[in-house]
Amino acid sequence: MENSSEYLKQERSQEWREELRNALKAKDRTAKIRVHMPEENPTERAKSSIEVNRGLTVQMAIEEAQRCLDCPDPTCIQGCPVNINIPKFIKYVEKQDFAAAARTLKETNALPAVCGRVCPQEIQCEASCFYTQKLKKIPVAIGNLERFVADWERNSGNMYIPEVAPSNGIKVAIIGSGPSGLAAAGDLAKLGYAVSVFEALHEPGGVLKYGIPEFRLPNEIVDVEINNLKKMGVEFITNFIVGKTATIEELKEEGFQAFFAGSGAGLPNFMNIPGENANGILSSNEYLTRVNLMNAAHDDYDTPIFLGKNVAVIGGGNTAMDSVRTAKRLGAERAMIIYRRSLDEMPARKEEIKHALEEGIEFLNLNNPLEYFADKKGRVNRMKVQKMELGEPDSSGRRRPVPIEGSEYEMDVDLVIVSVGVSPNPLIPQSLPGLKVSRWGTIIVDEKEMQSSIPELFAGGDIVRGGATVILAMGDGRKAANGIHNYLKNKIEKSI
């Protein structure tokens, strides 16, 4: 077989296309049924942090790869925010050259093992697949194949580290080590910049570490991806709050010439209803951070957390699902989702809803909290809820929930986790008076290169979008890296 590094230097040849097409005709490919992702038993997995999806076997991956038609105009790439050459990596899987498939992924994606697990491919690359668009069939399992390739490479013990250009000596600061910051760091390192990533918490990874439970994304996976960036020369500085530990002006004095703000949306929203300040009512951000990053559920750590028996999670997004499924794993006898719309309107991924239902999570749809009550010690013990019905669609396109008069009732709860959205981290905007922000507190940027009103500052992810998927944030990071490169190149040319 030809050396994998050679494959990286050339696009798919016509001969290769013909070889694969002749091996399996289009009608044979389209007749194949999508391979089902193996899953752990719901009863057993709901008691531990074991990863729910077990991953494809080699034979499963090859079978699924054989469904790909290698379209002349691959619309799946257009649906990928980081522009992975999807047909190319899948064809390498079909040819059983998994190392070359991994190299193809890493051409544009710094975190393939992460994206293969948590990205909503069903509304991105898979939604743009030829099967979905033209054949009206179930798309190729692009995300599952991406995970397979990344896991195969990691388990092989021979991880490919992308090549980096010779150092140009120019220092760039990345603020925040979430997905947008990591993507920007990877691309800038490839271009030869001296990249330092500043993280406020004690471990790098951002929302990948504190916000996503291990049963969906094991911390070990994130650590491996970050270690690859370190091998590319990226420096990680933890326990460092830009704007507090040092200002951007002070970092300029240390030689940093450009900045990328990927500080996320760490400010939780609450509903401002009576009793919301009672003990035992907290945000999803705080709850998941305590468990995921600070090991609150482990006996050998002293991070405080209350393990409720009757746990209500308010909201219907992926973070709400993560929170309620975590509560179940920590021993909740009754773990409930309370959401003001129906199951069909829930913004959470269908897979996450399916997994939650299998694990015994109660869904109290078309219900909305009105008030919380506390015991003599100030700890929440009951809540008042009102039933809802769906009215006409609102600006989001979903039918608006309307209260049903006289439908209020009370229920016992001893832990409430509020997951009704987050607002952008205000620290960077507050520390830069000349920075233009929206009325929601997000940084306003040029959408092509992610440049802010302060020329040397670029931004992406939740701090710009208010809320973004991992892969959209990574797409922002890649665009910003290109923008930073253009900005610094022009700056140097003008100084000559």
Image: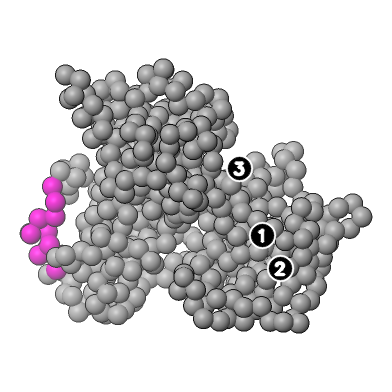
Q: Quadrant of residue 131?
A: bottom left
Quadrant including the C terminus: top left
Q: Which mark is residue 271?
A: 1
Give above or below for 492 relative to 107: above
Q: Judging from the image, what secondary structure is the residue with disc 1 in?
A: loop
Residue topped by disc 2? 369
Write the residue at 52% across / 66% down: 348
Is label 1 in contact with label 2 (beta carbons under 8 Å)? yes
Determine the image quadrant of residue 154.
top left
Can residue 208 be seen by looking at this rendering?
no
- Where are the magenta residues, as a range? 10-21
In the displayed structure, would residue 316 be above or below residue 461?
A: below
- Residue labelled with disc 3: 293
Whether residue 18 is in magenta: the answer is yes
Indicate the secondary structure of the residue bearing disc 3.
helix
Residue 145 image offset from top left, x and y in percent = 35, 60
- Counting other residues with Cα less than 10 Å from the Cα at mark 3, is it few (<14), some (14-19), or many (20 or more)? many
* For marks 1 and 2 on the same chain, the one whose residue lies earlier in the sequence: 1
The amino acid beneath tag 1 is Met
Q: Amino acid at mark 2?
A: Pro
- Mark 3 and 2 residues: CB-CB less than 8 Å, in contact? no
Extreme residue toward the right, this view: 376
Q: Position of residue 190 (x, y in %)?
A: 27, 34
Residue in the foreground of this view, choosing between 203 and 408: 408
* Left or right: 348 as drawn, with respect to 387: left
Q: Residue at left 45%, top 44%?
A: 437
Mark pair 3, 1: CA separation: 26 Å
Q: Does 13 sit left or right of 243 as displayed?
A: left
- Which quadrant of the figure has residue 25? bottom left
Q: Residue at x 36, y 45 (%)?
A: 445
